[in-house]
Amino acid sequence: MIPNDPYLLTPGPLTTSLSVKQAMLHDWGSWDNDFNQLTAEVCTRLLRVAGGENSHVCVPMQGSGTFAVEATLGTLIPRNSTTLVLMNGAYGQRISKILDRLGRRCLAIDKGDYHPPRGDEVERTLRQHPEIDQVVVVHCETSSGILNPIPEIAGVCQKAGKHLIIDSMSAFGALPVNVAELPCAALISSANKCFEGVPGFGFAIVDKTLLSESEGQCHSLSLDLHDQWRYMEKSGQWRYTPPTHVVAAFLQALREHEAEGGVAGRLARYSRNRDRLVAGLRELGFQTLLADEWLSPIITTFLSPDSPDFDFPRFYEAIKARGFLIYPGKLTVAESFRLGCIGQLHDEQIDAVVAAIADACQSLGMPVPVPPPAAAPDNLENH
Ligand SMILES: *Cc1c(COP(=O)(O)O)cnc(C)c1O
């Protein structure tokens, strides 16, 4: 850690290791073979983690994660086809907004703020709407922290012969996935989430046949994933200026991911972080939005206590003064805040953030344990 930097309990950008930051202390020529080798190794490693070595290709895209989502949807989805979007939060809504903007027809199953889309309802919708060609789902819906039932949905899509596209931005690297076995047409993620790199590019792991067939389909020049792929295949280079330092940092992050035991190792640490955070905060009187079954090891939503002394901006500042940045809630139904479990956070930091939250409550004049939330939304166990 750099002294006095706060720890980020936000789900990307997140706290990176010192060695990942140090990997950015060099300048690279974007056309030079030394840099091309970094890109090639990044793609090879990502394909291996995704289990797509024989069926898929990895195509990076400059920009934040949303740029990679827009590039993938715009490239793979034919202009006159219909897409089903499974929504249960802000990132699902963003997918449907992108499709609208691209003029791609789309239907949605909208489960509101935090209920999971289930296989049976997807199956029913696909039967009622045979015109649907592909389904898009968010793996971990970061706005509530819910872990959506991907294998269940993939099974339904496969049976119905529909392509599945997964926004696995905040899950890939920490939750096991095998794109060939699921199967899925494309899985999208970015550098600054569970692989613990710095922000600057996203990537898609795409079915090779499908990508080959998508030439000329994209609405955009700079976001054309097919063009990016072909150019990279031919030259080893990114089509336009790559985020060189970010790529170098990401390769270091991938090596550290492997050294930690890959997906299994990371899942174990993040799950431990979540369990310790949830237990610590429950002891302080806080309640989670979701039942344990749906809690992801990525980010957890806590309901705000029903107290006249609780005020999120003051709560945030009090915790920041103690060395941690937390995340506001993103629900329409209830006051809440979120704590991320990802990044360079270990037992020591988790215990320290729980202590900081206890102190912050007291500095706001609240008793500990804190009062319960106003009204607990209906429990997920019924859905
Ligand atoms: C972070 C994230 C994105 C991408 O967000 P950007 O701000 O564009 O990086 C997309 N989907 C999910 C589920 C995410 O968590």
Image: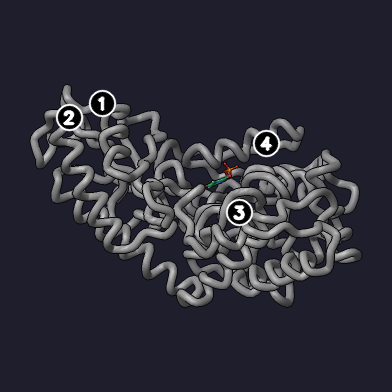
Tell me if residue 259 comes above or below residue 135 in the rendering: below
For the residue labelled by badge 3, is the local secondary structure a helix, a strand or a loop? strand
Residue 309 seen in the figure: yes
Residue identifier under label 2 = 364
- Look at discs 3 and 2 and give the one toward the viewer: 2
Q: Which residue: 17% across, 29% down?
A: 364
Classify mark 3 as within 8 Å of ligand 1 or not, answering yes or no.
yes
Front-most of residues 122 and 194: 194
Q: Amino acid at mark 4?
A: Ile
Residue identifier under label 3 = 190
Q: Kindly check if marks 1 and 2 are in contact, taking CB atoms under 8 A apart as contact.
A: yes
Residue identifier under label 4 = 98
Crowding near pointer 3: few (<14 within 10 Å), some, many (20+)? many
Residue identifier under label 1 = 311
Front-most of residues 54 and 201: 201
Tell me if residue 37 comes above or below residue 245 in the rendering: below
Residue at mark 1 to residue at mark 2: CA–CA distance: 8 Å
For the residue labelled by badge 2, is the local secondary structure a helix, a strand or a loop? loop
How far across and down, in percent of the image, does residue 137 sit?
57, 50
Quarter of the render that holds ligand 1: top right
Q: Amino acid at mark 1?
A: Asp
For the residue labelled by badge 4, is the local secondary structure a helix, a strand or a loop? helix
